């Protein structure tokens, strides 16, 4: 298996300890952290790293196609899982999770069908569901509910 450094090099990125650390943190988690949270984590290993370095590193990793940026509310979240998968964005706690269960939807299969029907050529498939996570549904009492 390629090391993280090899993957960075293969995409034409200079290998720096900060890049390896940030990419490594993202590969190790499925929590889709924000830049701020990544900064907190990376500071534990690289005390001198600035928020700006974290941000520019994330940008370089996105440009290289190694990670993706997701939006939930007004925060950006980062994900090193580039395979099409369903995201669940909780509007109460702001967490973004993966739908890891097999829900019988072939995200990759959507593109050829759309192209056959419309001629549209897909580069990237994203599916995010917005709502309330199971944790918030059981703990929060102030979730706005539709009036009957
Ligand atoms: Zn939640
Ligand atoms: Zn994800």
Image (cartoon, rainbow, N blue to C red):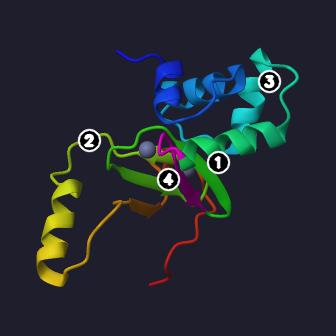
Q: Is residue 109 above or below residue 28?
A: below
Judged left or right of residue 30, residue 71 is right
Mark sitting earlier along the chain (4/1): 1
Rendered image quadrant of residue 40: top right
Mark sitting earlier along the chain (4/2): 2
As helix, strand or loop, the secondary structure at mark 4 comes to: helix
What number is the disc on residue 101? 2
Say if mark 4 contacts mark 2, CB within 8 Å: no
Q: Label 4: which residue?
A: 137
Mark sitting earlier along the chain (4/3): 3
What number is the disc on residue 136? none
Q: Is residue 118 above or below residue 131?
A: below
Residue 53, position in %: x, y?
Answer: 79, 37
Q: CA distance from mark 4 to mark 2?
A: 19 Å
Q: CA distance from mark 4 to mark 1?
A: 34 Å
Say if mark 4 contacts mark 1, CB within 8 Å: no
Mark sitting earlier along the chain (2/1): 1
Q: Label 1: which residue?
A: 59
Residue 67, position in %: x, y?
Answer: 50, 42
Q: Label 3: which residue?
A: 43
Q: Is mark 4 within 8 Å of ligand 1?
A: yes
Q: Is mark 2 within 8 Å of ligand 2?
A: no
Tell me the quarter of the image containing the C terminus: bottom left
Rendered image quadrant of residue 81: top left
Residue 8, position in %: x, y?
Answer: 53, 29
Q: Provide the residue span drawn in magenta.
A: 64-72
> Magenta stretch: residue 44 in it?
no
What residue is rendered at 40% in x and 18% in y?
2
As helix, strand or loop, the secondary structure at mark 3 comes to: helix
Residue 94 seen by the camera: no
Judged left or right of residue 79, residue 18 is right
Q: CA distance from mark 3 to mark 1?
A: 18 Å
């Amino acid at each position: 298996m390629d090391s993280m450094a090899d993957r960075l090099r293969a995409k034409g990125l200079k290998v720096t300890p900060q890049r390896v650390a940030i990419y490594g943190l993202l590969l190790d988690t499925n929590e889709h952290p924000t830049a701020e949270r990544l900064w907190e984590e990376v500071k534990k290993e690289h005390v001198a790293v600035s928020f700006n370095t974290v941000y520019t590193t994330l940008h370089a990793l996105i440009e290289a196609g190694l990670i993706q940026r997701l939006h939930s509310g007004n925060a950006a979240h980062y994900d090193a899982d580039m395979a099409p998968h369903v995201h669940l964005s909780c509007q109460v706690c702001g967490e973004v999770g993966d739908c890891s269960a097999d829900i019988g939807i072939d995200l990759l299969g959507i593109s050829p069908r759309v192209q056959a029907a419309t001629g549209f050529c897909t580069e990237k498939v994203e599916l995010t569901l917005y709502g309330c996570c199971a944790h918030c549904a059981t703990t929060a009492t102030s979730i706005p509910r539709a009036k009957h």
